[in-house]
Image (spheres, rainbow, N blue to C red):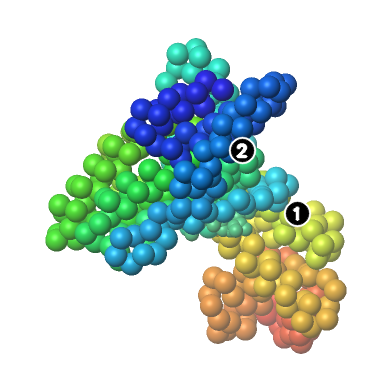
Amino acid sequence: MYTELLKIIEGGLVGDKEKISNYSAILADNLEKQGEVALPKKIRAVLSKKKGTLTSLDGFSTQPVDAESRMNIVEISTPQIIDSQIVFSKYVEEEITGFIEYYKQRDSLLKAGLEISNSLLLYGPPGCGKTTVAQYISSITGLPLVTARLDGLVSSLLGSTAKNIRKIFDYASKRECILFLDEFDVIAKLRDDKNELGELKRVVNSLIQNIDGMNENNILIAATNHHELLDPAIWRRFSKVITLEKPKKEEIGKLLNIFLENASEDILNNNKKTEKIENAFVGFSHSDIKTIINNAIKKSIIYERNLVTSSDVLREIYFHQNHSIDSEDDFINYLLRNNAPHREINESLGIPLRKIQAVSKNQTSER
Ligand SMILES: Nc1ncnc2c1ncn2[C@@H]1O[C@H](COP(=O)(O)OP(=O)(O)OP(=O)(O)O)[C@@H](O)[C@H]1O
Ligand SMILES: [Mg+2]
């Protein structure tokens, strides 16, 4: 309640009707949740009387656009991410839960005189869950996700990047939402281009000012694959930094359970096979693992086999790594090293048993 009152006062001081209106509506909702009846009713009555004079009561209808291209520079979504479909390491899970809790209890923190900054920097290799985490936090908090793709913004709009960044933050500051700056490193990469040095400085300064000016009802999340390129001044702005790495064996096991759930009891019920597949997946991203398993499942459906075998999955892993099967011997060697049974290789992949046995014999004699 304190935060809404502060926002309404702020809005009043700068004459921002939209902000006043949005936060008054939130205040009425929250008062009602606390059991108040009369006051929320009165607030809503005042709001509806003034409705005609407001530009928009629908908090999300006036999206910011680029001045030249007239294109929207943000995308708004309300993701529904299912808890059980996501796998985090224990440490990441704790940090994300903590971050959400700080946000939920910001009123108490504010009352205790603490400074609040709900900003999170996510970094790590591609396909390891940065966008997924932003969607997950949106889904858990119920806040809409306002995504600004900085790559598009920077490359096409050289002169007006700083201006667009301001527009995005202005827009986000007027409603309760998560502002998600995806591909955040693009800002840092501007440094490589000599002609753009002045522009970079403007953009970095504009970013810093805007991040500092964020209010406690918003969450800011930025994601990058190249954290090392970020300016230390920007880095310092984030109250929490989490790195999302490629999954370790334990997490791979959980991912297999999710992705193979309806497709392969054969693998999941056999500890030895599961372990081999887990080992074969070490070094891959969450996203790669999903793609590889989905490819194996698709193939089994197309060829009307109702089961995905370990050979099917290993084939897709091998193919994903090499983009071809140049040498059948090498491929069979790979399958055998990963404990795929001869009969299964033969039945799933159509490789003649004689051929498998010949390669297997060679393998044993080489040892
Ligand atoms: N922790 C996870 N648990 C389960 N699935 C995941 C996880 N992380 C990623 N995935 C799967 O991988 C896909 C790609 O992940 P995501 O887009 O979040 O990666 P990213 O880190 O944002 O990658 P990029 O750097 O390419 O933007 C997701 O759609 C999801 O299916
Ligand atoms: Mg992403």
Q: Quadrant of residue 88?
A: top right
Q: Earlier in the sequence, mark 2 or mark 1?
A: 2
Q: Residue at 14% x, 61% y: name it.
A: 195
Question: At 80% from the left edge and 74% from the top edge, which residue is drawn?
Answer: 344
The residue singled out by tag 1 in the image is 257
Side of 73 relative to 261 (left or right): left
Q: Is residue 91 visible?
A: no
Quadrant position of residue 366: bottom right
Nearer-the-camera pick, 83 or 19: 19
Quarter of the picture holding the C terminus: bottom right
Q: Give percent across and percent down for residue 9.
A: 43, 25
Residue closer to the observer: 114 or 354 = 114
Do callouts 2 and 1 mark residues in contact (Cβ within 8 Å)? Answer: no
**Callout 2: 10 Å neighbours few (<14), some, many (20+)?**
some
What residue is pinned by disc 2?
141
Task: Tell me what residue is drawn at x 68 percent, y 66 percent.
Answer: 293
Image coordinates for residue 121, horizontal then vertical, percent: 43, 41
Disc 2 to disc 1, C-alpha distance: 27 Å
Q: Position of residue 331 (x, y in %)?
A: 62, 77
Q: Residue furthest top?
A: 112
Relative to residue 23, is residue 37 depicted above or below?
above
